[in-house]
Image: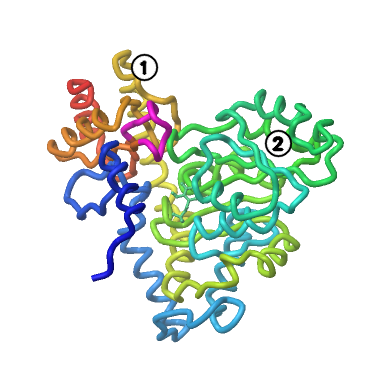
Amino acid sequence: MEQFPEKLLVKLSERKDNNALRSLPDSNPLVDFASNDYLGLAKNEDVFQHSLKMLKEYDFIRNGASGSRLLSGNHILYTELEKKLCDFYEVEAALVFNSGYDANIGFFSSVPQRSDIVFYDEFIHASIRDGIRLGNAKSYKFKHNDLGDLIKKCEDGYTTPSGQGLSQNAGEVYIVTESVFSMDGDSPDLKKLITFCNANNYHLVVDEAHAIGVYGKKGAGLLQETELQEQVFARIVTFGKALGCHGAAILGSEKLKSYLVNYARSFIYTTGLSPHSVATIIAAHHYLGSTEGTEVRKKLNENIEFLNQKLKNPNLKLKFIASNSAIHCCKIKGNDKVKRVSKSLQEKGFDVKPILSPTVPKGEERLRFCLHAFNSERQLKEVMNLLQSII
Ligand SMILES: Cc1ncc(COP(=O)(O)O)c(C=O)c1O
């Protein structure tokens, strides 16, 4: 057999030394506090049957898209889905990508141009960082959810070649944030951010991956909850989390859609989603907008409220990052320690995952509790009592 490169072996052993080596877990029967299936739609029978019915109605006996959407892969269900997304998210145009990762890579590698500048929150998702890295614009991070730091960075002259601040900059400025942060569960002040961007003609881009299904009218996200959806340049919505399926869309103007169809390489050079994937996304949105969808969101929000009541306990409060979303994080310093606590909870039947460095910075390791509509109050109470006794 061919020899495995020595340099790669060194990198693997570095991970082992830091107790941070990743491996694929087996599926488990534990109480789910780990998945992004916040509403339980990944296993929802109504969504499953609705998508089957749709495929039969369209007489779609197809296993795959058969090509890129620009060639043979743009089947009729895509047209129906993108129309539905425009209504659901109250936006002019929607473009579906194969995943949130693909959407962010496609957007950030192609939209900001060479003389442009991107400011991003320091805790932004890896897919956005990777997209920025593939593009030609300059980029700078600002402190997490810190508008003051962003304003300061924009005012500081170091961002432009002339050193005279952004007002002298010839290019466009893009600001990017998440409406619910995947590693903290907290949110920026979107209203203030929009006021700042509008006043300076900056383009705001918001990744709503963890807000969809949790916040907003029919679960359409935090921007829609605050009726700010028309004031952003683009929104990224993903379907693999609360919607329980797969894929993502970039929401914005028709011009932006046309630009992405022409220049976003992660859209152009890949096979489209299969008809059953697209049918499932339509069915999941339909469910989210139904009475049953409203009920299940209500249950999730009751669980979030219940947990926040439990977290008033001073022993726990200090360790948790304040959050009103489905993501709640308990900071436990060090890979060894956080792994040990997670293992203890798993042994007692609760699937709570440790988030290790380097996924988060060293010293910021944490246990991430993802709450779901299907978790019972008893499970929440038990897992918090256990955690308290362990830490
Ligand atoms: C904020 C954010 N954006 C994008 C993604 C990527 O989405 P997907 O899982 O659909 O690739 C994730 C997934 O973890 C995320 O948390």
**For residue 202, above or below residue 104:** above
Residue at 60% x, 26% y is: 146
Quarter of the picture containing the N terminus is bottom left
Quarter of the picture containing the C terminus is top left
**Relative depth, front residue between 218 and 220:** 220
Q: Which residue is mark 1?
A: 318
Residue 159: name its quadrant: top right
**Relative depth, front residue between 234 and 183:** 183
Residue at 30% x, 44% y is: 34
Magenta: predominant secondary structure element? loop
**Residue type at the position of mark 1:** Leu
Gap in angstroms between the C-alphas marked 1 and 2: 31 Å
What range is drawn magenta here? 357-367
Instruction: Residue 47 in the image: state x and y as whole percent.
Output: 38, 64
Instruction: Residue 105 in the image: state x and y as whole percent.
Output: 56, 56
Mark number, residue 194:
2
